[in-house]
Image (cartoon, rainbow, N blue to C red):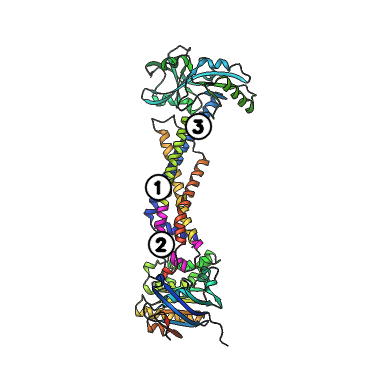
Amino acid sequence: MIPPGIFEAAGLTKIFDGGSVHALRGVDFRVAEGEFVAVTGPSGCGKSTLLQILGALDHPTAGTLHYRGKPISELANPSTYRAQEVGFIFQAFHLLPTFTALENVQIPMFETRLSAAQRSARARDLLKSVGLEHRLDHFPARLSGGERQRVAIARSLANEPAVLLADEPTGNLDSENAGLIMDLIGSLHRDRGVTFVLVTHDPSVARHASRTIAMKDGRIVT
Amino acid sequence: MTFLMIVLRGLMRRPVRTGLTLGGISIGIAAVVALVGISRGFEKSWATGMKVRGTDIVVNNMGGSLTPTPFDAAARDRIAHLPHVEATCNLLVELMGVEDASMMLVSAREWGGYEWGNLKLLSGRMPRDAAEPVVVLGQGAAEILKKKVGDPIQIDTRELSVVGIVDGGALVENGSVILSLPLLQEITGNQGKINVIDIRATPATTEAETKELCEKIDALVPEAKAMLAGGHIGNSQAYRFVQAMSWGTSLLAVLVGILGVMNTMLMTVFERTHEICVLLALGWKRGRIVRMVLWESALLGLLGGIVGVLLGVVGVKILETTPAIRGLLEADLSPELLVTSVGIAVLVGLISGLYPAWRSSRLTPAAALQS
């Protein structure tokens, strides 16, 4: 018997602009717990839209998506799901410019019951785990691109999520830093057993995943 | 890092804009403190003046002017015999330009009336009789007019002499030029007229009996109104007008403050749309975003309120020592007024933040991933 997937999607459809843009056209897929899946395809194929729906940042026009057997559309509060179940890694890092690295990592923890001291301690540990213990008090403007993405990765782990969703995590990095970030993501997946769904158009990045889903024109092609 | 630190960091993103907004609220709150404080101080100083004189009831017709309308001095004879009336004193009180001072309180008292007895002589002497062409000056009035015993003093067309400087025990008394009733009646062309009857009730008179006495006086003296001393100034239409103007000006200033904070908070929300979307994407609930915006605006209000209260207090103190006003103005800057003013400022901040907070709560997190 096949164990239930962490994500199970059936007929996912997303239509924008009153029907003129079909970002997803009936997508079916399944992601198993602990799996590392890369979603690849050219720009505009719908992979980022798919990631947004997985992260409850957007909702499908039609079709169903289950998280651990429960429909995401029936979540009482999508914020709680985003805060506790998933972590995001963005191409543009999206760190808050007026907060230090240490403070940026603490931001998601405000939706937990951790005290200020516990938040700070956990953020330190996370930044240490991504090799940034010497950059705790640096603002994003004073960090390199690779360092910013490492802070963002530490932030994505703030609430110990079961799933990490990464949208072109190396898209803004040079090849050396991109390699370092993918090594970090690979070790996080191995060491923490986190389920990874990574969106990329770069085949060299997708090679780090255990499975690749290729998309084209809003459909899964392989 | 605490939630308050996040709020403070939001305010410090644009220190100049935050500072200017604070300045706007502060001026509004300073206006509230100064205008309401002065208005209340005016009422309080009159009440103190009445208490010092030992007056329990004031009979006058305040009408719409700053000083009461004159009526026949014989009105007193109709009420002097009433039960609980211990003493009466006819007065003619005018606000007049005296020499360089554009507006002075000139208080003429019936010769031998009980109110002369409350004046404590600091230098010189009291008038010898009702006809002697002299005045005594409250110590504040002497300072304003730069007069000492023996100096001449011009009141309207009449030149009189200053024979004494007195301590009246209250700001109103100390700011007055005091003379006998017939002199001022003659100077102002109000022969046989007065505009105030002060009444001292017998010592054991209860408040209910005093109110009952007022009703009896009203029936016997229809040309004027009897009021409990202290409250009478609050019943003056002119005073009410001034008070309404004070509150109106304060309200306008506060409205300007509200618009200022709202503008700042809206700008903040617009500028931070992307950041707010990131916060939502990271799992922050909409309620927390709303709280963040409201806390920022309330904190702006609180800081503006504190600075405004300080500005208001300092401004009033400077006004009180200004030569043209010294001795005439004593603001009532009670702790209650100061705390209320800060409370108004916080409320202004919260009200101003409501719309920006609502706007921020309408944002969708998907936008964060699109750039």
Q: Read off the residue under disc 2.
A: B272
On the image, the x and y values in percent for residue A163 come to: 50, 77
Mark identifier at residue B43: 3
Tell me where residue A179 sits by quadrant: bottom left
Foreground residue among B342 and A63: A63
Q: Looking at the rendering, which quadrant does residue B155 occupy?
A: top left
**What residue type is disc 2 on?**
Arg
- Give me the C-alpha separation between circle 1 and circle 2: 23 Å
Q: Earlier in the sequence, mark 1 or mark 2?
A: 1
Q: Could you say where residue A72 lies in the image, as x and y percent from the top left? A: 52, 73
Q: Is residue B94 magenta?
A: no
Q: Are marks 1 and 2 on the same chain?
A: yes
Q: Position of residue B302 (x, y in %)?
A: 47, 50
Q: Earlier in the sequence, mark 2 or mark 3?
A: 3
Can you say whether A92 is above or below B202 in the image?
below
Dot 1: element: helix
In three-dimensional space, the C-alpha distance between marks 2 and 3, rounded to whole angstroms, equals: 49 Å
Q: Which residues are magenta?
A: B262-288
Which of the chains bears the disc numbered 3? B
Q: In this view of the protein, which residue sits in the foreground, B157 or A37?
A: A37
Q: Main secondary structure of the magenta part?
A: helix
Tag 1 residue: B24
| Chain at tag 1 | B
Query: Magenta stretch containing residue B286, yes or no?
Result: yes
Q: Amino acid at mark 3?
A: Glu
- Vertical arrangement, residue A162 with respect to residue B355, above or below: below
Residue A127 seen anywhere in this rendered image of the structure: no
Residue that protrudes farthest toward the bottom in the picture: A1
At 50% from the left edge and 30% from the top edge, which residue is drawn?
A: B45
